[in-house]
Image (cartoon, helix red, strand yellow):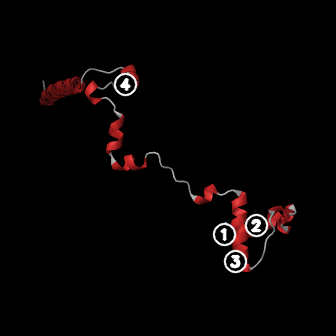
Amino acid sequence: MCMDEQVAQEEEKEDEVLHSKNARRRANLRKKKEADAEAKENAKGPKKSMDDVLFRQNIRPESESFKAESLFETPVLASGLNRVHHPAALQLTPAKLYEQIKKWAETRFQHTLPEDQRKLKCLQSVGLKSALLRDLCKSIGL
């Protein structure tokens, strides 16, 4: 055998040794990952089914049961539980609004409006109504 053949055989043996070492390392790493994953799952506790998650009832012990008196312990709830204040503008009726407009027209412009709002000239036709609505929207910025 010549020297080159011996060197080639030695290199092949070294390659085989390295290959087997790498294969063992990969196998050990794989086993370690599997063991770590299993340990994590065991640490989480028993697996829950979807029924347990979706339909579980949170039943409290008798000592923690709901009592209505506990609602009134907080001052904010106790003072304002049933109070609902509506803005004055939402309580206006068309008749009340027309009365306010009549008073305002008399005091500001010294003009007397008719008692019945349907007798106003600006509400006699559709064209005049839309013009009035347009002017009103322009004046309030809509």
- Pointer 3 residue: 107
**Residue type at the position of mark 4:** Val
Residue visible at 87% across and 63% down?
Answer: 124
Inspect the image, locate mark 2, and give the three-letter code of the amino acid beneath it: Arg
> Is residue 26 left or right of 86 when viewed as pictured?
left
Label located before the other in sequence (3 or 4): 4
From the viewer's side, name the closer residue of 19 and 106. 106
CA separation in Å, label 1 and label 4: 55 Å
Please rate how many residues cluster around mark 3, counting C-alpha atoms within 10 Å: few if below 14, some from 14 to 19, many from 20. Answer: few
Q: Which residue is mark 2?
A: 134
Q: Quadrant of residue 71?
A: top left
Residue type beneath disc 1: Ile
Identify the image quadrant of residue 20. Answer: top left
Residue 111 % position (x, y): 77, 77
Image depth: mark 3 or mark 4 in front: 3
Left/right placement of residue 123 relative to residue 71 reads right
Neighbor class of circle 1 (other Cα within 10 Å; few <14, some 14-19, many 20+) is few
Give the quarter of the figure containing the C terminus: bottom right
Q: Earlier in the sequence, mark 1 or mark 2?
A: 2
Residue 85 appears in the figure = yes
Query: Please, what secondary structure does the residue beneath circle 3 have?
Result: helix
Inspect the image, locate mark 3, and give the three-letter code of the amino acid beneath it.
Answer: Thr
The tag earlier along the polypeptide, 3 or 2, is: 3
Q: Nearer the viewer, mark 2 or mark 4?
A: 2
Q: Secondary structure at mark 1?
A: helix
- Circles 1 and 4: CB distance less than 8 Å? no
Q: Which residue is mark 4?
A: 53
